[in-house]
Every structure is written in C-alpha cells, then in structure tokens.
Amino acid sequence: MRFWDEETETLEKQKLRELQLERLRKTLRRIYQKVPHYRTKFQQANVKPEDIKHIEDVNKLPFTTKEDLYVDYPFGLVTLPLDKLIRLHTSSGTTGKPKAIFFSKKDINNSAELIARCLVMTGAQRGDILQNSMTYGLFTGAFVMHYGAEKVGILVIPAGPGNTERQINLMKDFGTTMLHITPSYALYMASVIYDKGIDPRRDLKLKRAYLGAEPYSEETRKKIEDMLGIDIYNCYGLTEMNGPGVGFECKYKAGLHIWEDNFLMEIINPDTGEPLPDGEIGELVLTTLNREAMPLVRYRTRDLTRIISESCKCGRTHKRISRILGRSDDMFIVKGVNIFPQQIEQVLMSIKGVAQNYQIVLESYDEMTVKVEIDRELFDGRIEKLVRMKEEIVDKIRSTTMVKPKVELLEPGTLPISEGKAKRVIDNRTI
Amino acid sequence: MNKVYMISVFAENKPGRLERITKVLTEANINILAFSITSTNGFGVIKFMVNKWKEAFDLLKERGFTVSLNEAIGIEMKDQPGGLYEVVKILSSKGINIESASVYVAETRKRAYLIVEIEDTAKAMDILKGENLKFLNPEEIK
Ligand SMILES: [Zn+2]
C-alpha cells in the first residue's frame, strides 16, 4: 500500500488550494460566530470572514499567539458545548498554567486519520508492530500515534517510556517492527542494546522508528540508523495542532510533508510578521482547516523552518518543510541577515576536530564571531590542520548563512559548559 | 631506532600561555631541551623536546592542556658555516618534507641537532640510513 488516502494525498495543487480556501472560510465563519475573543481580534484588525476571497488573503488576519490561549482560560477558544468535548491535552506554558487544547470525537478521529497517512507514507502496514515508547499522558505524543496506528491495523504495544530492560524484552518477545520514541531515548536504548551484546540486525525485527518531540540533528539520525539498522523518520507536531502528524517524512526523507488539507502553513519573518516566500527561513505559522472543537488561526509556532515547494518523488502534492531549525526566539540579525544558532551548530557538527561547545559573540551589527573549542582527542600537533579546519568553518558558515564570520579556535574547556539550553549567543550590541 | 619525541601543545594567542605550560614542566623538574612556537592569527602550537617526554605528556594532559605526542628525529649539524644547509639538502634530495623543526644544542659551540617532525618517521629514517648523518640517540637526553 503506497497511500492511505490516495485521492487527498495526491490532490492536484489547484484543487488543494480551493479546498484550503473553502475550509479556511468555514473555519473563520465558525470562530467569528462562536468565539468572542476571535471576533474582537478580527474587529480590531478590521477584517471579516467574508473578506477572505483568496488563500493569499490569509495575511489580513491577526495572528494567534500562545497568550491568546490564556484569554478566557480554559474554554475561551472552544466552539462546542462541553458535552461535545471528549479529550483534553495540555502542553507546558510559560505562565505557570498549561496550554489547554480540547478535541471533539471528530477531531480525535481526524488526527488518527492523519497519522495513518503518515505511517503508510513510510511503508508501514497491517502486520507491523509498533512499540509506542512516548509518554501516555497530558502530552499528545503517544495517544495520537496510538490511534493512528490502530486505524492502519498495526498492532500497538503501549510501552510508554523508560524501563529499558523491559523495552528490549518487548522487542525481542513480540517482534517489534517500529518504534515511536524521542531521539535522546532512542540513542540511549541503542547503546543499551549494544552493551547487552544484542545484534539488532540479527536478534530484532526493527525496521523503522519515528522520532520527534525534541530537536535532533541529521548526524544523530544517521548514527541511530546505523546502530540499529533501521530507517528513521522525522516527525513534527505540537499539541496546539493535534500533536504529532502535522509534518512527517516520506520514504525519501527530504523534508516533512504537511497535510495541507488540514493545515494552512505560512512562513513569516518573526520580527515583522511579514510573510516570506517559499524557500526562505522563518517562523512557521499554522491555521487549522479541519478542526471542530478548537480551531486556531495563524498560530505562531515559534519554530523556524522553510517551505520546500518542489514536488516530491513520492507523488504527494502536499508541500514539505525542512526539519525544524530552531526557535524563532533564538534568531539574531547580522548584516541584515536572519541567522539562528542552529545553523552554526549544524555546520560545526559536520566538521571533524571541533568539540560540541560553541558560542556566538555579537559586538556589532555587521560582524559575528564564532568561538569554537577544538577537540582534545583529535589534536595531533599540526598547525596546518588547524588552519585548514578554521578556513573550512569560515567557508561553511558563510555558505550557510551568507555572512562571513570571524572564527576563533579555543582550548577545550574555555567556554561555559552547556547545561541543557546553553547560552549560545552573547549579544553585546547596543542600539 | 633513534627516534625522539616532540610534545605539541595547542595555545590561544593570549598572554601567559607559555608561562603556564613551562611552569608545569619546571615544577616537575622536567628539562626543556628544544622548543619552537608556530602561531597564526589567534592561536598557535608550542612544541617541546624534553628529557622526560612521557612524564611531561601525561602531566600536561592531566592539567587540562591540549597536547599531542609526535615522533621526530634529531640530526647532528656540523658547527660550521653551512651546517644546517648540509642537513636540509639531504632531506630535500630524498623528498622528505619537514613539518616542524627546532634546534637542540647538546654542547654549546660543539654539538647541535636539528629536530624535525616529518610525516613518516620510520620511512624517513630508513631512507636516510645510508647517508653520512649522525642521529640523536634518545638515551642521550634522558
Ligand atoms: Zn514525499
């Protein structure tokens, strides 16, 4: 089976736009009528649902930010009476209270439908066995995947995270073929499998894994793929938008398809809110097009990515986004160019001889200094090698960001040790 | 084989780096016999030949320096005009590329060695076997 819903997944682009417009207008009429907060916002922006005549008109609409989710908390943005709501999921907020997202029966069924498309897109089918090692709880991750897999006819093992010993036994005893797991836990599990002397290619039946919920690099993907002898698919989602299954990679692993019949995506400049053309990096903004209980319009995800509009070899017409490149809050501007630390990080990770730790120092608006520690283990006493490595860093950062950096090679241990979210950017600029 | 060792230390171009390194060696009573500094914009590599190379290497590593241990050979130079020229002429005629060099004066005005790091020490020594060269014996500097 190549498609779960072939007609929708391969819908002609023009028809897809028409469907989007129809669903957008329906969504707008619904919230204008039923959500006082949205009606006020629209009135303040001097726009009515009927003003949206083309899909491009979407940029006349106001954004929804996470702050909007706390207005008339917790039911403020809900369009249905309480007895039509069947599920609450939350996601951690910054104000102390969690963001509360409600789902109707139709919404839950629809989110499972989207996951079914995603799974089939990666080659999964009836007969596969999914070990779901995400947390079953307030967070959407595990549930949505669980329902979607069941819809395809996949046997689901609701393992949840942790207890690695048991996880491995489940894989061995029941012949798990697929994992749904966070990247950090996958790496850990793979190393435990090795320590136990298990040869995953011989002793396990794993074929693929779905990794999400945390950022991870292409190098990490390759590493886990090599260790376990499987294919890893990148998945993207957020509780505000159903959870996982918003964006998912197909077999070609070249960007994540966004189900455009369900989500309208835009990329904006996070500073100005201006829409950016396809291909440019900016903040992902999503509008739900097929949600009943709690539709969200132009929701600012704070996630940075870019739209890949070229058609995909898999035949699906729905556009893709690149893997999430970082948070829009991390972005900084040098020489008028938007840059985010993850771009620099990706470059550094691809270069042999530099350690993981780095820092970006900004002293003026047209220069950035990247400080990198050298890798103690790879130092061989040759200065020419270090000079070449430094040139390579400069060249690669320049070609990635369009800004030629100053690079400083430092002795290991010079930079502050990264504790979780390390302070990567030191901005010493004054206006 | 008469091979000796050079200790290389990575250093940012900042005041006090050389002082910090030499202090560690002094306190351990390690004698620096030859040294060189190569530096470029921002950073450099300091190289030492010492009497107790293994001890010095371990000590610097333990103290958090970025160090590597590299093989080298010491070739005696005649104390006369052209002494250095004679040695490098032989090396270049044999296609041996010098990656780093420093000088070890064994006895002032009498005996000095050119200490060179090259890509393949064993191969180079083999090539140089038939030449009229005197190599520094590692026993001599212990
Ligand atoms: Zn595709």
Image (cartoon, rainbow, N blue to C red):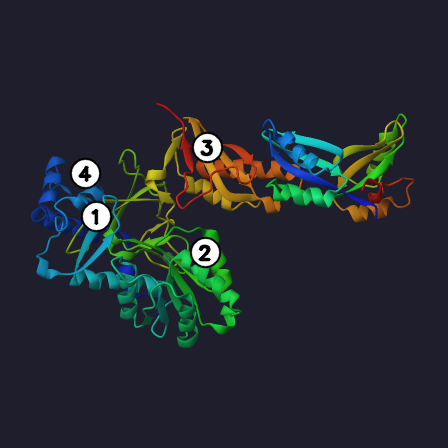
Front position among marks 4 and 3: 3
Separation of marks 1 and 2 at Cα, in angstroms: 34 Å
Q: Are marks 4 and 1 on the same chain?
A: yes
Residue that badge 3 annotates: A403
Front position among marks 3 and 2: 2
Separation of marks 4 and 2 at Cα, in angstroms: 39 Å
Question: Pointer 3: residues within 10 angstroms few (<14), some, or many (20+)?
Answer: many
Q: Amino acid at mark 1?
A: Lys
Q: Amino acid at mark 3?
A: Val
Q: Are marks 1 and 2 on the same chain?
A: yes
Q: Position of residue B44 (x, y in %)?
A: 63, 33
| Chain letter, disc 4 residue | A
Label 1 sits on a secondary structure element that is loop
Q: Are marks 4 and 2 on the same chain?
A: yes
Q: Are marks 3 and 1 on the same chain?
A: yes
- In-image side of A170 versus A226 (left or right): left
Front position among marks 3 and 1: 1
Label 2 sits on a secondary structure element that is helix
Front position among marks 4 and 2: 2
In this view, the residue in front, A115 or A372, is: A372
Q: How many marks?
A: 4
Answer yes or no: is residue A252 visible.
no
Disc number for residue A60: 4
| Chain letter, disc 1 residue | A
Residue that badge 2 annotates: A221
Front position among marks 4 and 1: 1
User: For the residue with label 4, is its CB less than 8 Å from the closest atom of ligand 1?
Assistant: no
Separation of marks 4 and 1 at Cα, in angstroms: 30 Å
Residue that badge 1 annotates: A97
